[in-house]
């Protein structure tokens, strides 16, 4: 790719700035807020116009927007030989992570209404809920004092089997992974070097936090409409874990077999995510077809030294570079189809959600 397609530009106060000594731009689906850092020299000792903490910024790679957010920190370092400026910030999820949610209680509130009530007072107006769950009403939603806006948002999303993140243009998305999307690129590492397009590829396999069997125990209290239910039990097994490593979890938020099953599947899928990670470093910030690397993409990996030939899910990526350094991207890849977002109702929501699950290789047994 041409060099200018990988150039990083900061838009602030109507002006564009580039030519960085160093930059880091992170994006991770499992992290609440994407972070960025930029460093440049100030030979004339003057701060660029509009550079103040809290200022809104847009980061671009070539002509593509990669992040929209605000400045958190401004550091100036003056020495005998130099005057440098370092800027750091996060995307628009930062205000949701840092600030408290408005305290309210609502009945028959849809997911879209809950999300709007939490994020709009904090200046988030662009929201897309990529699911039919958006219009589904919940019996009761109660926000407690001290809850951060992100905690409430994540809890409401997880109760519907979804997860929140921000698109590069600043739109809040509540959705899930698309495992039907075709791979955007192939990463190749062969011993003879033919067709290689990665600078390094690391595979990490770990047993820490991995479980072969997870059992979730729950109970349902009686109401005027139905009798209580006790000894609710769902056990989920991971055939891919060769060592017997059981775990039993008591879940007060799971008061039906569907809830215990969903909770068990979610816990086991999280353990599988920790079991294997591929970390690839590639030149530039784009695929061979010119597509900017973004979390949520699927990537075909072929590595002869590792014995790998399959499709993986891009969970995170980091853009790095600067003057004299070139541009590179670090890709964090996970097993495809493992990141499962099962609905898990919170007790404060008082709602049971049942969703049909795609077969992902986990064996489930329910005992009532």
Image: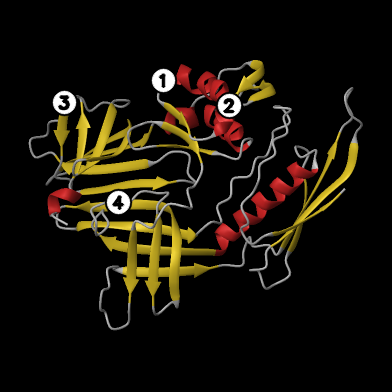
Q: CA distance from mark 3 to mark 2?
A: 41 Å
Q: Residue at x 55, y 20 (%)?
A: 113
Q: Mark 2 and mark 4 in contact? Answer it, CB < 8 Å.
A: no
Question: How many marks are shown on the rendered structure?
Answer: 4
Please, what secondary structure does the residue beneath circle 2 have? helix
Q: CA distance from mark 4 to mark 3?
A: 25 Å
Q: Residues within 10 Å of mark 2 (few under 14, many from 20)?
A: many
Q: Nearer the viewer, residue 39 or 110?
A: 110
**What residue did someone put label 4 on?**
319
Q: Quadrant of residue 305?
A: bottom left
Q: Mark 3 and mark 2 in contact? Answer it, CB < 8 Å.
A: no
Q: Residues within 10 Å of mark 4 (few under 14, many from 20)?
A: many
Q: Residues within 10 Å of mark 3 (few under 14, many from 20)?
A: few
Which disc number belongs to residue 111?
A: 2
**What residue did someone put label 3 on?**
49
Q: Position of residue 147 (x, y in %)?
A: 60, 27
Looking at the image, is mark 2 or mark 4 nearer the viewer?
2
**What residue did someone put label 1 on?**
123
Q: How is the image coloured?
A: secondary structure
Looking at the image, is mark 4 or mark 3 nearer the viewer?
4
Q: Mark 2 and mark 1 in contact? Answer it, CB < 8 Å.
A: no
Q: Residue at x 88, y 24 (%)?
A: 225
Q: Earlier in the sequence, mark 4 or mark 3?
A: 3
């Amino acid at each position: 790719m041409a060099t200018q397609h990988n150039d990083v530009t900061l838009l602030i106060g109507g002006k564009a700035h580039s030519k960085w000594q160093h930059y880091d731009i992170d994006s991770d689906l499992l992290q609440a807020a994407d972070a960025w850092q930029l460093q440049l020299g100030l030979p004339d000792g003057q701060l660029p116009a509009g550079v103040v903490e809290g200022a809104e910024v847009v980061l671009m790679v070539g002509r593509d927007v990669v992040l929209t957010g605000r400045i958190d920190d401004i550091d100036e370092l003056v020495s005998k030989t130099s005057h440098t400026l370092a800027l750091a910030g996060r995307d628009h999820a930062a205000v949701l992570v840092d600030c408290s949610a408005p305290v309210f209680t609502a009945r028959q509130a849809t997911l879209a209404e809950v999300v709007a009530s939490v994020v709009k007072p904090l200046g988030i107006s662009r929201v897309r809920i990529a699911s039919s769950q958006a219009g589904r009403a919940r019996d009761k939603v109660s926000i407690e004092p001290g809850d951060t806006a992100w905690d409430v948002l994540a809890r409401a999303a997880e109760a519907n089997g979804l997860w929140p993140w921000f698109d590069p243009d600043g739109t809040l998305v509540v959705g899930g992974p698309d495992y039907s999307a075709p791979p955007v690129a192939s990463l190749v590492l062969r011993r003879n070097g033919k067709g290689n397009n990665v600078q390094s590829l690391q595979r990490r396999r770990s047993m820490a936090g991995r479980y072969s069997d997870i059992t979730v125990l729950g109970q349902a209290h009686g109401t005027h409409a139905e009798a209580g239910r006790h000894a609710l039990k769902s056990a989920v097994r991971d055939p891919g874990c060769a060592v017997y490593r059981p775990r039993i979890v008591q879940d007060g938020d799971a008061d039906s077999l569907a809830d215990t099953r969903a909770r068990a599947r979610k816990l086991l899928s999280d353990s599988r995510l920790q079991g294997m990670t591929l970390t690839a470093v590639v030149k530039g910030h784009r695929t061979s077809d010119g597509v900017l690397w973004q979390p949520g993409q699927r990537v075909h990996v072929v590595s002869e030294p590792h014995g790998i030939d399959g499709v993986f899910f891009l969970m995170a990526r980091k853009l790095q570079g600067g003057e004299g350094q070139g541009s590179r991207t670090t890709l964090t890849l996970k097993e495809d189809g493992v990141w499962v977002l099962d609905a898990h109702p919170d007790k404060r929501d008082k709602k049971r959600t049942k969703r049909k699950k795609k077969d992902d290789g986990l064996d489930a047994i329910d005992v009532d």
